Image: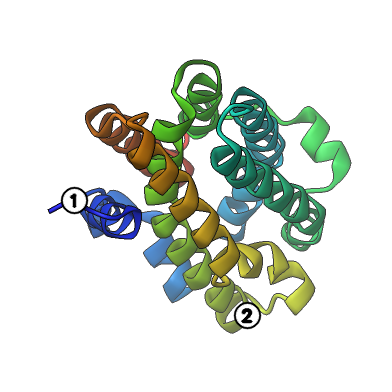
Amino acid sequence: MTRTARELLKTIAAELAPDPRANPLVPLIASGEADREVLATLALEQMRVIPADRRAFLQLALRSSAEPEADAYFTALAEGEAIAQRRLPAFAAACGADEARASAYTPLPGCQAYPAYVAWLALNAAPADAVLAVTANFSAWGGYCATIAGALRTHYGFTDGACAFFDFFAEPAPDLDRAAENAVQAALDTGRLDETRARSYGRLLQSYEALFWRTLQRPA
């Protein structure tokens, strides 16, 4: 029986779901045990990650000119990153990460490995394969953001504005889900999807995601 895009996306998201032990920091934030300085570092790293990912998604959209469904998906992702970038300063300010500190900050290699690999995908991956890999990774990221948003209010006294960055990623995104499904279905229908390669990309993304959080907990 031929699988649908929805079934495939669900299967790969389950396959690539991270081990709860792979992220030692979010549970500490959830319980209020993480130091505020760690939150500041998280903000400073995201100041580099978000614009880098946005440019990578725009590049993937550009490379998807012959695949309108993938183009629509990556364009939507880039627009989402732009929204997140506008919300990030409020979180950074609440953490004490002002512009002067951000300018002087040296990013951590373990945190920047993730956006570096997204940029690699933008240059090297077939768009359809990247759709599958990125979508599977986002399911874990959204859960982390929901947990952090709640903890920032409960344990750290952050305002709604300061939590808006995480709220954005934690919110259901049915339009984006449909765009991903349409892109994967079009690739399946035309034989453009290499599931083995997409799974490999997805596993690497999840590994770099886990490295991001481990690095924040224990910066080199």
Q: Whole-percent x and y of residue 158?
A: 70, 75
Circle 2 residue: 153
Q: Name above or below for residue 172 compared with residue 198.
A: below
Camera-nearest residue between 129 and 24: 129
Q: Is residue 29 left or right of residue 140?
A: right
Q: Residues within 10 Å of mark 2 (few under 14, many from 20)?
A: some
Task: Determine the residue located farthest toward the right in the rendered image.
Answer: 100
Q: Whole-percent x and y of residue 187?
A: 40, 37
Q: Whole-percent x and y of residue 177?
A: 50, 60
Q: Is residue 34 left or right of residue 87?
A: left
Q: Residue at x 37, y 29 (%)?
A: 192
Quadrant for residue 78, please give it. top right
Label count reads 2
Residue type marked 2: Arg
Circle 1 residue: 2
Helix, strand or loop for disc 1: loop
Q: Is residue 109 visible?
A: yes
Q: Whole-percent x and y of residue 77?
A: 63, 47
Which numbered disc, 2 or 1, marks the residue closer to the eye?
1
Q: Is residue 99 left or right of residue 185?
A: right
Task: State how far apart marks 2 and 1 are (Cα).
Answer: 45 Å
Quadrant for residue 139, please give it. bottom left
Q: Are marks 2 and 1 in contact (CB under 8 Å)?
A: no
Residue type marked 1: Thr
In the picture, the quarter occupied by the C terminus is top left
Q: Residues within 10 Å of mark 1 (few under 14, many from 20)?
A: few
Camera-nearest residue between 114 and 123: 123
Q: Is residue 137 visible?
A: no
Q: Residue at x 59, y 48 (%)?
A: 42
Task: Determine the residue located farthest toward the top in the rendered image.
Answer: 124
Camera-nearest residue between 103 and 8: 8
Task: Determine the residue located farthest toward the bottom in the rendered image.
Answer: 154
